[in-house]
Image (cartoon, rainbow, N blue to C red):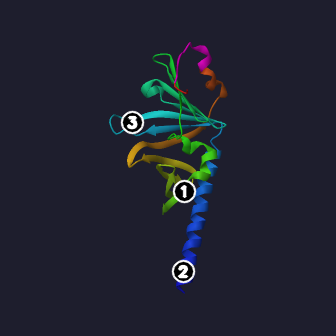
């Protein structure tokens, strides 16, 4: 009898893991050629609005309303465009807090737990050295909250306000400006 209950618990947790992965995968896959309006929760100062745009596997993180920056992630390279100084800083990286939004990384997420509260499901994942907390709304099929911890330190906390389409022409803003390039990729 105990064997039956152990098997049942294992089977239910396996279904929950597959459902979590499918919900998250569907949401992330559906973001291509879209943008998310995100309220970044900042502990030290007031919250600010950021826009995350996704085109293929390239991520555009626009925080110009807060700090005049747009960060572009392509592969393992980050380019940060500082509009206040017309500078671009290029860097290589192994992991970014925005890696969660790249479909190729979804299979690397390890589900730790899921707790359902009405239409909201709280998922906890581990991705490399990051702990990721996600709140997924089953009714709207959208992620509504995302939090990333690294070494027990909260490095990113946000409410996802809405998903919208975007105009691809908005990705070509870099052509109009002369930029001083600081290249740290070597």
Q: Left of 65 or right of it: where is 138?
A: right
Q: Are marks 2 and 3 in contact (CB under 8 Å)?
A: no
Identify residue for label 2. Answer: 5
Identify residue for label 1. Answer: 110
Camera-side mark, 1 or 2: 1
| Rendered location of residue 144, percent (x, y) | 50, 48
Closest to the observer, 3 or 123? 3
How far is mark 2 from mark 3, CA to CA? 46 Å
Q: Secondary structure at mark 2?
A: helix
Residue segment shown in magenta:
174-183
Residue 118: tell me if it is visible. no
Q: Earlier in the sequence, mark 2 or mark 3?
A: 2
How far is mark 3 from mark 1, CA to CA? 29 Å
| Residue 52, numbered circle | none
Q: Secondary structure at mark 3?
A: loop
| Rendered location of residue 53, percent (x, y) | 58, 34
Q: Taking 176 as reference, is 120 above or below it?
A: below
Q: Earlier in the sequence, mark 1 or mark 2?
A: 2
């Amino acid at each position: 009898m105990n064997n039956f209950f152990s098997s049942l618990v294992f089977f239910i947790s396996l279904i929950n893991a597959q459902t979590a992965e499918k919900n998250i995968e569907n949401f992330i896959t559906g973001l291509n050629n879209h943008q998310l309006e995100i309220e970044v929760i900042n502990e030290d100062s007031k919250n600010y609005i950021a826009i995350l745009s996704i085109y293929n596997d390239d991520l555009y993180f626009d925080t110009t309303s807060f700090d005049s920056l747009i960060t572009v992630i392509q592969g393992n390279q980050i380019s940060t465009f500082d509009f206040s100084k017309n500078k671009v800083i290029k860097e290589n990286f192994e992991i970014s807090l925005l890696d969660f939004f790249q479909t190729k990384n979804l299979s690397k997420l390890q589900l730790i737990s899921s707790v359902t509260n009405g239409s909201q499901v709280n998922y906890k994942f581990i991705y490399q050295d990051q702990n990721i907390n996600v709140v997924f709304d089953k009714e709207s099929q959208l992620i509504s909250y995302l939090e990333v911890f690294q070494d027990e330190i909260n490095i990113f906390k946000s409410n996802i306000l809405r998903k919208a389409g975007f105009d691809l022409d908005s990705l070509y803003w870099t052509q109009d400006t002369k930029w001083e390039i600081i290249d740290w990729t070597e």
